[in-house]
Amino acid sequence: MISSIQFKNTNIDVLRLDAMNLPVGGNKFYKLKYNIAEALEMNFPSLITFGGAFSNHVCAVALAGKLNNLKTIGVIRGEDDTNNPTLNFCREQGMFLHFMSREDYKNKYDENFIDACINKFGDIYLLPEGGTNALALKGTSEILTGIDIQYDHIICAVGTGGTLAGIISTPDLRSKVTGISVLKGDTNLSEKVSSLLDVENENWEINYNYHLGGYAKYNTELMEFILQFEKTYSILLDPVYTGKVFYAIFDMIDKKQIAPDQKILAIHTGGLQGWAGWKYRYNK
Ligand SMILES: *Cc1c(COP(=O)(O)O)cnc(C)c1O
């Protein structure tokens, strides 16, 4: 589903992964699709994954596990908080949550820990933090399936880069692809994305100018932008990813870094579940 919006004489097509009624929200559906298929095919009883206490990825794994009758284990950075709506959503899906101190979390993939989990839960299919791996890429390279890809410019959010890498891997793509990084200081991202790709496509870049202070950080300008955007276009953006993406696109149009005659496709990767956690976290 595509919504067309106008900003200063520039048309932007928005691919609405947020509004497509996917069983698991937004880009996470594509990232998990082939991983879940593999776990089922290989008869793994459980999935294990890792993330922060407000992670869209951990939520998506909890939900996907429930829908596919797989047990799920979420290894969460930091302490439990029984009022955190994100964690409670995961628990409601039947996810077992294991909390790790920030120090221990740095070694979360440690063999001893994973072995202990296998002892406790049986064989576990491991999804890395953020969910980006080769099978995720196979899924995200289907995001543009069925869409006329005659765009000059395709723009999406970048967290771990699995979604961007999938878009870049779309067969016969000739558009310039730009990823907007929502993280501060992770300047290795371009290398990570390059290493994931198995196609020859150099027509892409990551823009690091719009993290607005860092991952899940915000300022009042961003919040006002998101409110105004919803009023004007009736499209709700999320505060962590897509808010920053559209803020970036509008700013690049303002600064004439994107010419008005360019055909633009922006991907709304979803993430709206993040609002509950965001409001709780920042007490709004
Ligand atoms: C997880 C997420 C992303 C980031 O995807 P990556 O593949 O990790 O880069 C982007 N947008 C939304 C809404 C997300 O939830």
Image: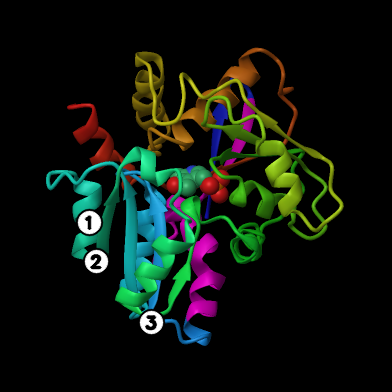
Mark 3: amino acid: Pro
x and y, in percent, of residue 278 in the image: 28, 35
Question: Which of pointers 2 and 3 lies earlier in the amino acid sequence?
Answer: 3
Provide the residue designation for mark 3: 45
Residue at left offset 67%, top offset 60%: 141
Query: Alpha-carbon neighbours of circle 1 within 10 Å: few (<14), some, or many (≥20)?
Result: some
- Determine contact: label 1, label 2, CB under 8 Å: yes
Taking the image as shown, residue 215 lies to the left or right of residue 94, namely right
Q: Mark 2 is on which residue type?
A: Gln
Residue 266 in view (yes/no): yes
Mark 2, residue position: 93
Q: Are marks 2 and 3 in contact (CB under 8 Å)?
A: no
Q: Start and end of the magenta stretch?
A: 10-39
Query: How far apart, in angstroms, are the residues tagged by discs 2 and 3?
Result: 15 Å
Residue receiving disc 1: 89
Q: Based on the picture, tell me whether residue 202 belongs to the magenta stretch.
A: no
| Residue 6 drawn at (x, y percent) | 56, 29
Q: Secondary structure at mark 1?
A: helix
Is label 2's Cβ within 8 Å of ligand 1? no
Asked if the beta carbon under badge 3 is closer than 8 A to the nearest atom of ligand 1, the reply is: no
* Residue found farthest to the front: 112
Report, in whole angstroms, how far the alpha carbon at label 1 lies from the one at label 2.
6 Å
Q: Position of residue 260 (x, y in %)?
A: 71, 23
